[in-house]
Amino acid sequence: MKWEIIGYTAACLTMFGFVPQVIKMFRTKHVKDVSILMLCQVGLGIFLWLLYGMHLRNSIIILANAVNLATIFVAIFCYCYYRRRNKALEVVKTQVRK
């Protein structure tokens, strides 16, 4: 039973590990210092953990990594959206200055 508590605690901590970064991206509307390579690499790792959890039929691993993968997808979407948006705003600002 003690190991299940440790497993659930670890799952909760990792499930919401990227939430602060996603919130920061929403608030600041900037992703300049966020590495898309890191997001993709971690996303792939989480996906593989999810597959491993499914193979083991381990609900802790499955739940933690499914939620974590969804958070990573949101982070990648925010990265792509705000990067494109901010580049477009820079073009407009440059044209207005001329």
Image (spheres, helix red, strand yellow):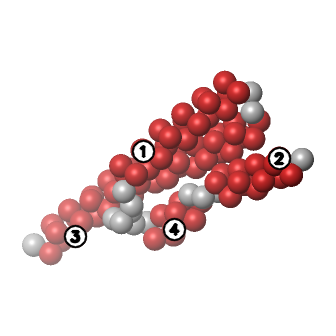
Query: Which numbered mark, 1 or 2, is in the foreground of this view?
Result: 2
Residue 41 shows which numbered tag? 1
Which tag, 2 or 3, sits closer to the chain's start? 2
**Picture coordinates of residue 28 (x, y %)?**
46, 71
Q: Quadrant of residue 64?
A: top right
Between 4 and 84, which is closer to the camera in this rendering?
4
Q: Which residue is mark 2?
A: 4
Which tag, 3 or 1, sits closer to the chain's start? 1
| Disc 3 to disc 1: CB gap under 8 Å | no
The secondary element bearing badge 4 is classed as helix
Q: Residue 38, can we see it?
A: yes
- The quarter of the picture where the C terminus appears is bottom left
Q: Is residue 74 above or below residue 90?
A: above
Q: Which residue is mark 3?
A: 93
| Disc 2 to disc 3: CB gap under 8 Å | no
Q: Amino acid at mark 2?
A: Glu
Q: Amino acid at mark 1?
A: Gln
Mark 3 to mark 1: distance in Å? 34 Å
**Going by the image, does 65 lie left or right of 22?**
right
**Going by the image, does 11 lie left or right of 47?**
right
Residue at the front extreme, as displayed? 2
User: Label 3: how many residues lie within 10 Å, few (<14), some (14-19) or many (20+)?
Assistant: few
User: Label 4: how many residues lie within 10 Å, few (<14), some (14-19) or many (20+)?
Assistant: few
The secondary element bearing badge 1 is classed as helix
Query: Which numbered mark, 4 or 3, is in the foreground of this view?
Result: 4
**Picture coordinates of residue 19 (x, y %)?**
59, 59
